[in-house]
Image (cartoon, coloured by chain):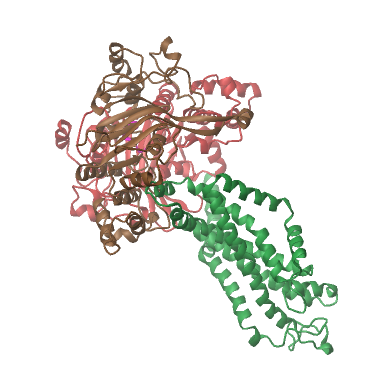
Amino acid sequence: MSSHPLLEVERLSVSFPVTGPGLKGLFLKQKLHAVNAVSLQVEPGSVVGLVGESGSGKSTLGRAMLKLEPSCAGSITFDGLQLDNATQSDIARLRQQTAMIFQDPYSSLNPRQTLGEAIAEVLKVHRKCSAEKRASRVDELLTLTGLSGDYKSRYPKQLSGGQCQRAAIARALAIEPRLIVADECVAALDVSIQAQIVNLLLELQRKINLTLLFIAHDLSIVRRLCDRVAVMYLGRIVEEGPTESVFSHPRHPYTAALISAIPDIDPERRLPDTLLRGEPPSPLDLPDGCAFHTRCCFAREACRKGEAPELRGDGNHQYACLLEAGEAERLTDPMR
Amino acid sequence: MSPLLTVDSLTITTRAGLNLVDQVSFSLAPGEMLGLVGESGSGKTLTCRALLQLLPEGALQITGGRVDFDGRDLLRLSPREMRQLRGAGVGMIFQNPSTHINPLMTIGQQMAESLRLRGRLSRKEIRARSVSLLEQVGIPSPEQRLDSHAHEFSGGMRQRAMIAIALACSPRVLIADEPTTALDVTVQAQILKLLDGLRREHGLSIIMITHDLGVVAQTCDRVAVLYGGRICEIAATADLLKHPAHPYTRGLIACQPHANVNAQGPLTTIAGAPPTAEEMPAGCRFHPRCPDAQRRCQTRQPVVHDVAQESGHRVACHYPLQRLIHRELDHE
Amino acid sequence: MTALTSTQISMGQRVTAPLRRLSRDLSQRTTLKIGLAIVLGWVLVALLAPWISPYDPVYQDLTTRLAPMSWAHPMGTDNFGRDILSRVIYSARVDLQICLLGVIFPFIIGTVLGTFSGYIGGWCDAIVMRLIDIVLAFPFLVLMLAIITILGPGLSSFFIAMALVGWVSYARLVRARVLVLKQSDFVLAARSLGYSHSRIICKHLLPNVLTDAVVFSMSDVVLVLLNGAAISYLGLGVQPPVAEWGVMVTEGQGFITTAWWLTAFPGLAIVLLAVGFSFIADGLSENRGGTQ
């Protein structure tokens, strides 16, 4: 085991220019801060979950970490390689060791390529094997992901969602990556298929010691799959730590609310009485202080002013909340 | 209590003669929330669209069954009678509110449209009624929001607005088609709470279409599980979740990870994929994926029968799971 | 009441259902087939022109001027005594050439510029878009006429003018598609897999864009054909005595009250070829919609 993380980001920020609403927006270009000074480490061989609601910036962060989205501040280090002023060859090296899986399996495959062509293309571009061996390697990859070699002449539209996602995973594995970023890769699938794909990822992770960044909004799957979890709210990580610790002792009120809001298949547990109020504010107009204070039932004066709270806590389990440990402990009870 | 809405052997057929919905029967009592659970292609959405004659014209046809609502057969209503009923008797809300609210009309205008269908009301009365409806669905400062367009609302607020529009006709049954699938969990909980409240306070009957057993567990009184266009199990929620009698139901429950339990290792899965309409298996439609399938399952279609008469637990399986087995599962 | 209306509904369905089925079945592949048959028919006519035309298209027989339809001259003769059927047949050669060359240059130029402007964006996009604005600022026909006048009348000037003006619609169409596809997951996936830009453009974007451009070109052919006729009509395209449908209509217009066949038959030929192409366009677009 190497001592340094496989992928590390330091105070990474990503923003997009957007046109705001109304006449004002026509003249004033606004910036949407999708990711705000995020620091995250992914240890080799681990599964890190990145959770948050829509608009929290989790997908943008995932893409920016692979240099698929330009970042405006902060640094990214992949396997000791600084990627801030990355040259073409640095990016090429990153691409040879990372892959991505997307939410919609149909749209992530080129509709005019058969599965075989799509996988063979990866092998060809990255010179993974000789031209003669390519066909057998394609079969091997399809078999590894639970499809069979027969599928290589099929087009994506001829497959079910689950089969398509397996093919997308096979294509990602063709690179022989060390890190896979899976962006909501089971959210669009049927419930019975979700479990199959999650199991496939778990199995692959063990079999080839894959490192996985699992971006999802479904906390129950994250709890099952991930070693560590980072919770994002409006572009910031509000809590990060070992999965068990975060789920059983959430330190940030937002994490606690998220966990309590998951509908569990337990008929004894009806809807929680205390719900999180309202909806997240617009990322174009972030409130001062802690961005969560508008919805937090523990918010106090200090939460509403100044800068957003920094992550704190012991090195293992960090949270960005001003509440003290004692107060935070109470969070779990009233929320449930 | 006698049921408000009874669906009896509803069958929907494509032009090619494939039954997308096959002999589906269920009933809905006043003030009840019934869950219709199933994967894609299970026919849950089609069933509910058929109730309102909202099937894609020409492509699909209702070839059998009846739907009793208030002593009338909904399937034999004229288009005009259906239009009246759509507002007043049965309302519907959809998964994606932004595509089902007219973007060019304000929320108030759309509510007024529905309110006018209900009878002659003055402008003032309409406005007052609209404001109270928006208040009822929990939209803050309803006076101003009445004049907003859908795009000025956030996702959750849009869903609330759609519920308000549906409620404007004071329906007795509300069909909610995956109302929270497009929403975040925290907002989903709010909307579920709202629907639950409407049912408790106003006696609204709700049919909740969803793929998420978690949503069902939290809100519904009874659940019907659909697979491949047929009902495979129907029971009270607690009964179904604790003692599923159909192997498919058991599989569905098992393959969802619990958020509140610390567990490791692979999830239980159901092998294979849901069947498509073109390749519907003979016999029990679940048999290719069923771990307990016997020879009889491959050829003979099981009929829905009572498991426990007193609780109304019904299942369509030749070999329904015994309760004994479930005690073991519970301990696991 | 209920029973009555329900029988009415089912009767209505019984009446309309076969009609709808017919139109759908026809729409599935038949439109494409009919269109292809018509166009291929014209291609055959053009290829076999010397053998199937009864007379030399430019041979003047001043003794039979303005003869009406007869067994000797099935479509009659014109004011110089030339056989109209032969001229219509020979015209197919010129007009099909107009269709092909009038579309292929704008198609290539527009697709290339549109792809680059959409994919690269920034300054490249700005330049292409301004070029498009400039071309669009003039009425289409006026710009065509101006260019042809500068270059001198003739078919080659027409093709150059078409290429300079016609690429705009292709570029706009392709650019819009590329902008959408650029955001799609499979292009992002291709980037995440470390593919080069040229590979992404050639292997992933173009195959998905080309179908749209081809479908559009089939409806564009109709416009080009009519344009060619219009330009020839104005005396700037095909020069007499070469037979071309547009020219024939021009020449015959003076006799429209006395000898209608001079204009009617070449006009019909234009319509028939145009219908063929638009059928292909419809068939292609439906076919595409069905499979995706």
Depth check: give the residue in front, B291 or C135.
C135
What chain is the green one?
C
Q: Is residue A332 above or below residue C93?
A: above
What chain is colored brown?
A: A
* Image position of B163 (left or right of A202): right
Q: Nearer the viewer, residue C248 or A313?
A: A313
Percent from the top left, x then y, of residue C122? Answer: 56, 44
Quarter occupied by residue A119? bottom left
Q: Count how many numbered circles sit on residues in the image.
A: 0
Chain B's colour is red
Q: Which residues are magenta?
A: B210-216
**Quadrant occupied by the C terminus of chain B:** top left
Residue at image location 43% in from the left, 10% down from the top: A301
x then y, percent, for residue C124: 57, 48
Corner quadrant of residue A326: top left
Q: Pick the quarter of the image with the N terminus of chain B.
A: top left
**x, y percent for residue C151:** 74, 66
Residue B215 included in the magenta stretch of the image: yes
Q: Residue at x 67, y 49 (%)?
A: C133
